Image (cartoon, grey):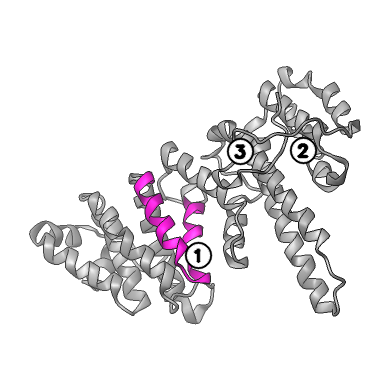
Amino acid sequence: MPALIQLASPRHEPFFSENIEPDKSPLLDLHRAYPDATIAAIESLINGAHAARTGDGARAVKVLAEVDPVAVTRFSRAALSKLATSHWLQDEDDFLEYSDNHAVLDLQRLVALAYEQSPADTEILISKFLAGASVDGQARILAIYRRVLGHRWEGEARPSAPAQRVALKRMIWAATEPFTDAANEAIREVFSDYVPDDIKPLLADFVDELLSAAVLLDDTILRFDAAANKPRTGLELIERQNDRWALTKLQDGLVTWAVEGAKGDEKATGDFVDLVARLPEDRDGFKGRLVSKLGDLAVSPRTLGLRPRSRAAVRCGCFGKSRVSGGLPTSAHGATWPKCR
């Protein structure tokens, strides 16, 4: 079986796999002739204790999905179990652990494909495994969303808009939750400064939620600063600076995605400007990051007229009356920021 899988979907080996032409027909022929035995063999590979064989099994499922779409959802639970709990899986670009590294990628691709086929059901399954995952397991599972939201390898199919909507809502919520450092890094990689072209058309519907999450993160940053104790060593100072950088980097990513969604839209741009005007004086850092993005919003004749409001917003220090935004992520009840009108 591993030989047929290698022929159908070559393993990513350094220096050797670049020019291998895959031949899927032998594996597909075997599946057509002996479907139950083929599925059982693949299941044994995925559930085994050998990283390279686990990756083989995950890649085999992707091949079979071309003729048997149910195969992907059938194996998504096993793939998530490996990602969540298998400590032998390595997620490092280390030559000596190359097979382990690519086993992780193969499993993530399998789950991303299941997400594409059935986003709601796969989301429920991911949530269950995420709750009990190890520290590294949480990061590996959250990295799946990066693929669904458009960060994919050349040649991979573009995810569907319904799957991306579910994934984006989930990631906005995750950005406000207290995960581990490794998991937070995976979330930051989703909301990077680079906004994939695939996701841009959907962002206009999520501007309010993205900004809400950014404001909630600013609450976290303010609490972080207020609780600051004077570092006793240089190492403590560096660690504290790194922790704060991680928070502001994620906040910047959320704002960047919100700007991309609001760009050229008069109402969304106006809401963005109103938020800047309503921020209180103790949020100068966040306000400065928002102000730096105002120029990116005026990209059409309709939004150019908002520049006077932008200048007024920069000068304005009033906050107005805060209330909970209707577009807040589900975990953020009780947080306040002004709903722009």
Q: Nearer the viewer, residue 3 or 275?
A: 275
* Residue 188 is covered by the magenta coloring: no
Numbered disc 3: secondary structure: helix
| Majority secondary structure of magenta residues | helix
Residue found at x 80% / y 45%: 286
For the residue carrying disc 1, how many other residues have a C-alpha within 10 Å: few (<14), some (14-19), or many (20+)? Answer: many
Q: Quadrant of residue 215?
A: top right
- Looking at the image, the residue that sits furthest to the left is 33
Quarter of the figure with the N terminus:
bottom left
Label 1 sits on what residue type?
A: Gln
Discs 2/3, front: 3
Cα–Cα gap, marks 2 and 1: 32 Å
Q: Residue 270 appears at what percent x and percent y?
A: 73, 25
Q: Is residue 128 magenta?
A: yes
Tell me which residue sits at (77%, 28%) in the image: 274
Give the extent of the magenta segment.
Answer: 119-147
Q: Position of residue 47 (x, y in %)?
A: 29, 72
Residue that protrudes farthest toward the right in the picture: 315
Q: Which residue is mark 1?
A: 138
Q: Camera-side residue: 324 or 1?
A: 324
N-term-proximal mark, 2 vs 3: 3
Query: Which residue in the structure is indicated by mark 2?
Result: 293
Tell me how far mark 1 sits from mark 3, CA to CA: 23 Å
Return the mark for residue 209: 3
